[in-house]
Image: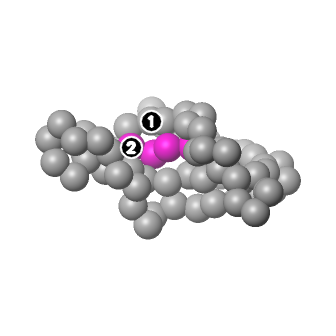
Amino acid sequence: MENQLLYEFERNQDDAVRFSLREYKARKYLDLRIFYHPKEGEEMLPTKKGITIALELLPELRKGIQACEKKLGNFSK
C-alpha cells in the first residue's frame, strides 16, 4: 500500500502538515508530518518532524486533542 494523503493544512508559506495513512509490516498507521518546499516550484518533501501512530491509538489521540481544546478554550481567535 502506498502512502495515502488524508488531509493537509499550511503551517506557513514554506511548509505544511500532512496526515497520511501508511502501512508497515501489514499494520496501518497514521503519519502526521511536516513537509517543506526545498526550492520554489519543487515538490514538497517530508521532514523528520512528525509522529506515526497505530490506527488503534486514534481514540487516545482524539482524547488528547479534546483535552487540549478544553484547557485552551477557543484559542484560535
Residue 14 lies within the magenta run = no
Label 2 Cα crowd, 10 Å radius (few <14 / some 14-19 / many 20+): some
Q: Earlier in the sequence, mark 1 or mark 2?
A: 1
Q: Residue at x 60, y 44 (%)?
A: 2
Please tell me whether mark 1 sits on a helix, a strand or a loop: strand
Q: Is residue 41 above or below residue 56?
A: above
Q: Quadrant of the C terminus?
A: top left
Question: Could you tell me how far apart the alpha carbons at marks 1 and 2 are, in whole angstroms?
Answer: 6 Å
The mark found on residue 9 in the picture is 1
- Residue 5 percent across, percent down from the top left: 55, 37
Give percent across and percent down for residue 50. Answer: 51, 61
Is 1 in front, or is 53?
1
Going by the picture, which residue comes out furthest to the bottom? Answer: 48
Query: What residue would you read off at disc 2?
Result: 16
Left or right: 32 in relation to 25: left
Q: Residue 56: give its label.
A: none
Q: Which residues are magenta?
A: 16-20
Which secondary structure, mark 2? strand
**For the residue carrying disc 1, how many other residues have a C-alpha within 10 Å: few (<14), some (14-19), or many (20+)?**
few
Q: Residue at x 70, y 53 (%)?
A: 23
Q: Is residue 18 magenta?
A: yes
User: Which colour style is shown?
Assistant: one colour
Residue type for callout 1: Phe
Residue contact at pointers 1 and 2, CB within 8 angstroms: yes
In the picture, residue 26 is in which quadrant?
bottom right
Residue 63 visible in rendering: no
Q: Quick check: 20 above or below 24?
A: above
Image-based side of 49 in relation to 43, left or right: right
